[in-house]
Image (cartoon, rainbow, N blue to C red):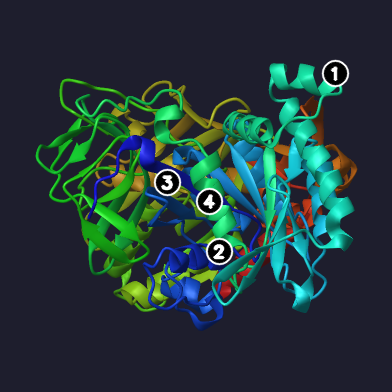
Amino acid sequence: MKVFETEKIRNIAVIAHGGAGKTSLVEAILGNTGVLKRVGRVEDGNTTTDYDPEEIKRQITINTTAAFCQWKDCKINLLDTPGFADFSADVRSALRVADGAAVLVSAPDGVEVMTEVYWGLAEKKNLPRIIFVNKMDRENANFEAALDQLKKNFGNKVAALQIPIGKEDSFKGVVDILKQKAYIFNGGKVEEQDIPADLAEQAAAEREALAEAVAESDDELLMKYLEGEELTAEEIEQGLRVGVRNANVFPVFCGSAIKNIAVTSLMDAFVDLMPNPAEVAGEDSDPDAPFAGLVFKTLADPYVGKLSFIRVYKGALTAEKPLLNANKDIEEKIGQVLVVRGKYQESVDRLNCGDIGAIPKLQETETGDTLCVKGEKVIFEGIEFPPSNFSVAIAPKNKGDEDKLGTAMSKILSEDPTLSLEKNLETNQNIFTGVGELQLDVAVSKMKDRYGVEVEVETPKVPYRETIRSSVAKVEGKYKKQTGGHGQYGHVFLDVEPLPEEHFQFEETIFGGAVPKQYIPAVEKGVQEALSEGILAGYPVTNVKVTLVDGSYHNVDSSEFAFKLAGSMAFKKAMEQANPVLLEPIMEVEVRVPERFMGDIMGDLNSKRGRILGMEPVGQEQVIRAHVPLAEMYRYAIDLKSITQGRGVFTMKFSQYEEAPPNIAQKVIEIANAEKQE
């Protein structure tokens, strides 16, 4: 395998809304470079980058997959990314290490939601972007409408570099606005022609728009343009190259990935217009510089083992020496360095600065970690992942599968930093959390197909609490049992009162040895055990103060056990008399949405028994803060996606416990009692 110099590398993330044709485009590019004997189709489940069984089954991209190829003496590292919001962590990983993005738009569908979202992520990083209006051969394909939408959404930096010749079934080629020539594609051959007469006027108008966009990205060209001088093709081409690399111009190409029409024009643009890693700030492309790179993706392959994808940012990566995981201060052995094209892997001697590859079987390294040479410690900025707020409770279907579930989960969690598993000790459930429902559904499916573990999935139980609203005094608890030998005797009186600011407090005011000192800890222990299960619905009791005020004992029959039971009995009796109530957890929720959705979001939060705390504008968006009961938030990720068409995000954290409304409390108590009877 040839080793490519930094200047000959292009790292391109292919991003778009699901269904725009990203995987088909990557497949066409690989076919054009000759690395594929046969170009696959998503529908047939045989594409290079959608090779995971879940991707084949669902016909969607789930993982960012790397695929390298060679074009015009350059190595192009393509990162085929998912288009669905639940897998946006992988898009963020790809954008973190790419030097540019190919943004796909479906000609029949126009600019869709996730295209807007991912464009925003690229915009934050000031990444160069080239736009490809795909599916020009499809029914209802409309290039002009798509271009108008692109300009409306992303501004006048968007400029057509091509316009289509024909559309739908008659789509056969493109007009190159810069060269003012037409190109007809037929069976893999390209024929250059003059611009068709019916497109001459449109081509001239788009050339003027392109010249204006390019001029605005260069002061010298702008002066010339404003003085009314016409820019030459060479000036536009040079200005375009600079404009694209500085993310000041976003050229629009068009074509059909499935029919491989005008895909080579896009490939040329990757090489000619996109920056190489040496042109990106912060790179140290000196081959003798000490190595450092960022792990941006982890795969747990059931056959190959763990595979860590890495982007080289300093020096060169070789398999000769162990490296330091700078985040964890742990040494990692490097057995092999691989280049990857889908599931195809090839061992290489080295990866130069700017290149992308993979290292198998790293022990401790995770996504977002920096690997570097020992003694030259550096930690690169990690990857900002989306918030994970969608939870389900999981349990193995088959008894005895707990260990298998643990092993499967550790592999699945290692692949995706947005997934987590926690044991809720209050509800005794395993809580599996991720970005969205589809993501968790895929993970559960992987557990079954890949690791042979079936799980049952349900909505998590709410960890309610119980407390009291009134004080009661001198509540008696007596445990007396007479058997053939020694009996049991414990006798206490408790004062119980609400304690709003603390979980629990125990005091004693015993006078005259009514309860001997050696038995007082046992009374406290009995009360604490009684706290674990309240009298309303069996939930833990909180915010109570208990004072041992009196009691009696027997010289022979009294014991720690008897006083522990007496304490427990007295506390339960006191709870019944002290106006017990159910408490529910309240979450502090922060929702970030485009301004036009603010009214709908506030109405929805109100319907969920939420209290709006405030709002503030952040750029073009509004941030709404509210207190909302946890019971209303378990499906909120789905609701928010529905209301905002996927444009909204939210975070939440525990705030406090509050008394549940009587109608809610009654339902919870009825369900708890029914479960007890079962």
Q: Which residue is mark 3?
A: 529
The numbered dot on residue 25 is 2
The numbered dot on residue 207 is none
Residue type highlighted by circle 2 = Leu
Which residue is at a point 58% across and 49% down the rendered structure image? 102
Residue type highlighted by circle 1 = Glu
Report the front residue among 7 and 453.
7
Residue type highlighted by circle 3 = Glu
The numbered dot on residue 268 is 4
Residues at marks 2 and 1, CA–CA distance in whole angstroms: 41 Å
Q: Which residue is mark 1?
A: 227
Of the residues under marks 3 and 2, which one precedes in the sequence? Answer: 2
Query: Is 536 drawn above or below residue 619 in the view shown?
Result: below
Proximity of marks 4 and 2: CB atoms separated by less than 8 Å: no
State left or right for residue 142 relative to residue 332.
right
Residues at marks 4 and 1, CA–CA distance in whole angstroms: 32 Å
Residue 177, how many percent across, how many down?
Answer: 73, 48
Which residue is at a point 43% across and 24% down the rendered structure image? 510
Q: Secondary structure at mark 2?
A: helix
Query: Is 220 drawn above or below residue 498 in the view shown?
Result: above
Crowding near the residue tagged with mark 3, few <14, some 14–19, many ≥20 C-alpha atoms within 10 Å: some
Residue type highlighted by circle 4 = Asp
Residue 202, how many percent across, how many down?
Answer: 86, 52
